[in-house]
Structure formats: structure tokens, C-alpha cells
Amino acid sequence: NFVRLEPVLEYTKKHYNTPITLSEISQIACFQEEYFCHYFKKNMGVTYFQYLNEIRLSHIYRDLTSTDLPLKVLLEKHGFTNYKLFRKMFYEQFATTPGEYRKNAAVSD
């Protein structure tokens, strides 16, 4: 089953920082949109957009400690356009805010 998703995962890895529509990613998978959503979730355990946002979050998480770029720049660099949504997702994933994480990581260095 993962063979069918391989082009999707590769495309997502390369283009995670650009807007990706359901129509676009469904075409890459050669599925209709509804079937793609069902197929992806069944095989990956999360929706496609949850998967995409987890990739974006992981890049921002890494960059918070490896760069001193402002958070706004990191969001744009890694494809997030909605700060409130990003902050909520970051907190749910890491149990801290981006600012707290950066500050605590700097203190521990």
C-alpha cells in the first residue's frame, strides 16, 4: 500500500513549504479526492493535512534552536499562513509555545 503513497510522500517532502491543495495531491496519487482522503488516512493513520502540518512543524521546531530568524519568517519559510492555527498545533504537539521553546533551548545551551 505504501508503494501507492510513495509519490505523495516524496512530493510532500519536497514541496511542504508551498501551498498544496487536495486536488493537486490527489492527482499525484492518481486518486479522486474523496478516495485519496480515505486511502491516506487508512494507510497513514492521520489525514493528509495533519501529515503535512507535522512535517512543517518539525522543520520549524528544528529552526527555532538552530537559527535566530523571527517566528514570522520561519512560518513563511515552512509554509504556515495562519499564526493562530500554527501556535495551537505547536502547543498540542510539543506542550509549549514556540517562544518558550526557543527561550528554554537557548538557556540549556
Image: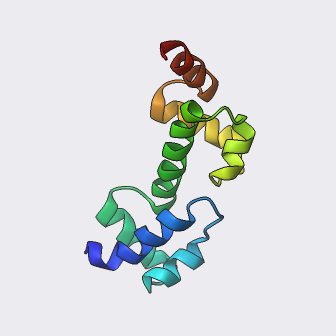
**Does any portion of residue 80 appear in the rendered image?**
no
Instruction: Report the colour scheme.
Output: rainbow
For the point 25% across and 75% down, which residue is it?
1
As displayed, is residue 62 above or below residue 106? below
Q: In which quarter of the image is residue 103?
A: top right
Closer-to-camera residue (65/32)? 65
Q: Which residue is drawn at 47% across and 63% down?
A: 13
In the image, farthest residue toward the top:
107
Residue 10, given in percent of the width and then of the height, sits at 43, 70
Residue 17: x percent and y percent?
Answer: 61, 59
Q: Residue at x 71, y 41 (%)?
A: 83
Answer left or right for 35 relative to 63. Answer: left
Q: Can residue 94 be seen in this view?
A: yes
In the displayed structure, 32 sits above or below 72; it is below
Residue name at image x 49 percent, y 72 percent: 11
Front residue (pair 108, 61): 108
Residue 66 left/right relative to 18: left
Left or right: 86 as drawn, with respect to 53: right
Residue lying furthest left? 1
| Residue 98 higher or lower than 18, as above or below | above
Q: Residue 24: where, in percent of width, then height?
A: 58, 78
Q: How many marks?
A: 0
**Is 106 rendered above or below residue 14?**
above
Q: Nearer the viewer, residue 23 or 104?
A: 104
